[in-house]
Each structure stands twice: as structure tokens, then as C-alpha cells.
Image (cartoon, helix red, strand yellow):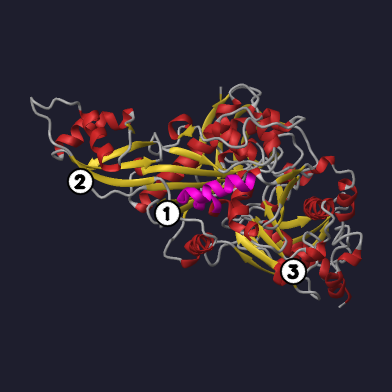
Amino acid sequence: MFKVTFAFEDGSVVETYANLGDNLLEIAREANVAIDAPCSGNASCGKCRVQLKSGELNTKKTLHISDEEFDQGWRLACVSTVSADVTVLVPDIASAYKSRMKVADLSSKEEIAIFENAKSEIELTGIQLSNSLDVVEVTMDPPTLDDTMPDNERLSRALRKFLNLKRVRIPYTVLRKLPDVLRNNNFSVKCVLRTTSDDMFVYDVFGIDENIVIGGLAVDIGTTTVSAVLINMENGQILAKGSAGNGQIRFGADVINRIIESQKPGGRKKLQEAVISETINPMIKEMCKSANIPKSQIYRMCVAGNTTMNHLFAGINADPLRMEPYIPAFFKTNSLFASDVGIDINQDAHIIMAPNIGSYVGGDITAGTLVSMMWNKPEFSLFIDLGTNGELVFGNSDFMMSCACSAGPAFEGGDISCGMRATDGAIEECTIDKDTMEPVYKVIGEPGTKPIGLCGSGIIDLISELYINGIISPKGKFIREGKRIRHDEYGMGSYVLAFEEEAGSVKDVEITEVDIDNFIRAKGAIFSAIRTMLSSVDFDISMIDNVYVAGGIGSGINMKNAVNIGMFPDISLEKFHYIGNSSLTGAYLMLLSTPAEKKTYDLASNMTYLELSTVPNYMDEFVGACFIPHTDLGMFPSVMEQVKN
């Protein structure tokens, strides 16, 4: 056995042990050390860089590490094996994807405004903000020698009389505490109930004087990031809001790599524990601490995620999703409870799942469609969710259709050498001086935070600025020279936003021609999907009245820059609306309102799913879109006007 020490730039260390020949990336995963590996360890992305500080590693050479960097100790963890005691430095950029857990400051109006607006808009459609949870007070006669009815029947009889229902269900968790609560409170109690037309379910029982919050939890399980809100189910008040990196990401940035990982021995359990035990449960703990309510007082949960995330969350085999004919185990299910999957809330809490539409269009899109309100408008709208995959919905109050395109993880920083998710240290906005080529950028975090990488919105800004200012060609190749432009030994160009001394990392923050090429393919997938879906119903881009853009890509997308690079169609900027994390907002509405939940099921069942791989001209559209802005420049007149000037 050899000692393996992972050291971090903040001075902390994680120590573990390994056998001769064990893979360093796998050792890190077992030790819960965050090392970015979007390709899941097949040496194609080059992002699992660590620096050998002492000891020995057997490492294969790759093009991702130059000879100079290799001499400085830089290695790829995925191609390194242990041969002695070893210490390696994990730089911030390698672990930046694993966002530090954050609980939002709810004194900020911006944090809750989106939920309040969503409530107002949904009510205007006639959908009531009501659900089946309630607290009732009941008083019973104490038992006597003449009245020997057992406690559970005594409570059931009182509740039936109170609410005029025939069937009352009291689970074991309530039965276990019932004798003490009844006798400590002279048989006057409060009950937390779920009431339907058929029966009543008792979630909890308390003394008559106790303060009770009927808690609810809405969760957006993104491939990269998990976000959640803790709410009061009686009035919809946001009690706490939090986010964290999805612990599954160490098994790959995209859903295919995670499905493959889940098929290894014990893999399904590992992936389920990564998202539940490592991500959601710690977030619940922090949010409950912030809101000062017990976890056991969360009685309902709503989950919105893509189809793969839903399967891995539930511990269900997702392998059929990646193989033709791409059939999931479920589109919708009402059979899941907290105790089934190990969610650390009331163990009898029902877990609602936003319904999936297809193998690659999931509940995050149905929840987002609900929030967009496009289903309630006669004008034609386009809804785009930019995440690890690109999902789209087009339609109006008469019809809707959806599709998914394989954009890859570029919009959340994957496949980009200095890419990262939108967390502290990420450049989220950028401009470049046309003459000097000097950048001005905005970094997420406290004032003075140094940049360590680029998130999606920053990448869009940067590539747009490079193209509009004539620094790169339509193919993404550098055509100007200057202090911030350089070429490696293979002739590959790059643009440096922050040199090492300016950055908060151990290397320059730069974007390379390979990065730009990866992003061009990602944006090309989005634009070609838009064109293909519209043409399938004999529409063209001029007929789009509104575009709703969602996703945790940053503080918001600069729509003009997104048009400049050919990701979005060249239409009036007034038609674009950034609606943030619509998946979480939709989950919130489904949680709070049973009618909104039913409406989401209706939207999913009435939505047509278009499988792009079966459309003959999709690849032609994609190839045409893999230039900046496009091979057909006539589709982007406003961009061409900027380039001329």
C-alpha cells in the first residue's frame, strides 16, 4: 500500500492509500477529491491536470501536457498510476467545477423575485396555488376503563369526524410517536395531513402549542449543478435557497459517460449516492439550518431533471436510454418516497417528479415550459434550455413540439481548457478593445476575486468579441498578432485573458483554437436544431415572436453576442428573454400547486417529441452552422453590419 496525498492551493490536504498500479483519477474519486474529468478519464479533454510534488507516478505522455509542463511536474490524473508514496497538487481550476455549496441571502430581492413573478403569472391563467397538505387541530376524549379504544383508532375517528372522510392512514413513523404526543398534550394535537377525495394520510403529529411549518423542497438536478428551494407549503414563502455542484460530475461531464459508469459493478449505487448523499442531503441540512426548521418537517419534494438524471437519482437502470430505440424506464411516476432513495427529510414524504418527454428531453424542460407561459399565448415562442445538453420547445397555445441536441458541456465550461461552471472565480462578462486587444472582464465572487476560468456567458462574450473585432476568422482561427495572442509548438493559437500573475490559478486563463472549435460545434448544434425543428412544421425564423432562454450559464446571456456568434437567430433583440433557472422555478410551482403539477403533466403528454437524428437534413444544417456566425451570412445581416464597421 502506498500513501497518496492530494494537496490544494488553500493549504488543505486529503490523504488516502492505494495499491501499486492504481489509477490516480480513480483514487481521487474514491476519496471524494474533486478533479475535473469531463471525458470521464479517457484522456481526450486534458482537464484532470495535477502537479507532482513528491514521490512517483507512472504517466503516459499526451498532447495535453507540453514537455516544459511535464518537466514542471504536470500530469493528467487519468493516465497516471501509483508506484510509490506520492503527493500531488490539485489546482483550483481542476476542482472549480465542484461548486462550493451556497445558501442564498434571501434579503436580496433578486433571489426571490423570480418565484414571486412566477406565482403571479400562473395565477393569472386561472391555476390555483393550492395543494393537498394542511395542518388541523383535533381534541379527543382521553381513554378510560369504559373507553378502551387504541390511540390510532381514536385519532382516526376524530379526524374522520373533523373532515368527513372514511379512510385515514397512519404510517409507522407517526404511530411510533403517537402515544407520547397524545398523553403529553392531554389528547389535543395538531396533525400534518395530505387530504384527497379518497383518503387522508397523516404525516406527523404534534402538541397543540407547537409551531409547525409545512415544509416543501423543490430541486433542480442539473448534470453540472443542483439547485433547491425550501418553502412553506401553506403560502409559498421561500425559506431557504441553495446550490451545489452535482457530485456525479467526477464520473463524467455528460450523461452518456455517467450511464456507462453506472453499468460498472456498484456503479448505479455510486452515482445515486453522489447526487443524494453527497449533494442533495448536505444542501438540505444547510438550508434547514438557515431556515431554522427540522428536516423531518419537509413533507413533500419535487424534482426536475433530465431523463438520465431522473433515472440515476431514483437508482433505476439508465442504460437503455443510450441504446436504440432509446426507451426510458418511465416518463412519469408517482411511486417514489423519501425513504425509497434516502432523501433526508420526512421519510413518508412523497417525491413528485416533473415528467419526461423523451429519452433526452426531461422534466427540467417540462418544468421550464410551464414557467415560460408559452402554452398560454397565441404567438409563436421558442424556449431554449442551455445546459450540458441543449433542449428546445417551439409552439403556442395550440401546439408544442420539442427536441434535444447534443451540444456537449461547453455551455457550462466543459470541453473548454479554462472552462468552469458559473461559480466564484469565473469570468462571466468580457469586452475587448478593438485596437489594443486588451480585455475588460467581470469575475463572479467578492470584489477583488481573481479569475481562474470562464463560464458559459463569458465564453459567448469572448468569442463574439474576438470575431467582431477581427481577431479570429469565421473558422475560429487567430488572424491578428499581439501581446495576448500566442502560438504553441504545434502552431495552435490562443488568446490570454489573464496572465498567471493576474489570475487566481497556477496558469494563464486563456482560450485556444481548440476551445473555440468545441464551442462553435456546441452553438452550431443549437442553431441547427432551431432551424430543423422550425422547418419540420414549415415555419421559418421570421415567424418567431418570443425566445425564452433558460439555464445556469451565468448571470445572464448577452443576447446580442449570442446572435453575433450564430447561436441564436438574427431577430429583434426585444424578442429575447432570459428566464434563469426555469427548471427550479417550475419545480417550485409544481410543489406549491397541485393544479400546476397537473398542468405540467398535460403539457408533457401533449408535446410532440422530434428525434433530430431521424431528420435527413439535420446534419446539413449542423455543418452549415459550424462557422461564425454561419456559412449563409445572409441569415445574419446585423452581424455583418458590425463586422463592416
Tag 1 residue: 240
**In front: 335, or 102?**
335
Residue 348: percent from left, percent from top: 39, 34
* Residue 612 visible: yes
Disc marking residue 208: 2
Question: Which residue appears at 56% of the width and 49% of the height?
Answer: 599
Residue 204: percent from left, percent from top: 30, 38
Kind of residue sitting beneath label 2? Ile
Kind of residue sitting beneath label 3? Lys
Question: Is residue 479 placed above or below 147 in the rendered structure?
Answer: below
User: In the rendered structure, which segment of residues is drawn in magenta?
Assistant: 586-604
Q: Could you tell which of marks 2 and 1 lies nearer the N-terminus?
A: 2
Question: Which residue appears at 66% of the width and 42% of the height?
Answer: 357
Question: Which residue appears at 52% of the width and 30% of the height?
Answer: 16
Tag 3 residue: 560
Q: Inspect the magenta stretch and tell me whether residue 587 lies in it.
A: yes
Real-space CA distance between mark 2 and mark 3, rounded to the nearest whole angstrom: 58 Å
Outermost residue, bottom side: 645
Q: What element carries label 1?
A: strand
The kind of secondary structure the magenta stretch mainly shows is: helix
- The 10 Å Cα crowd at callout 2, few under 14, some 14 to 19, many 20 or more, is many
Q: In which quarter of the image is residue 274?
A: top right
Task: Give the number of the mark in front: 2 or 1.
Answer: 2
Q: Is mark 3 on a helix, strand or loop?
A: helix
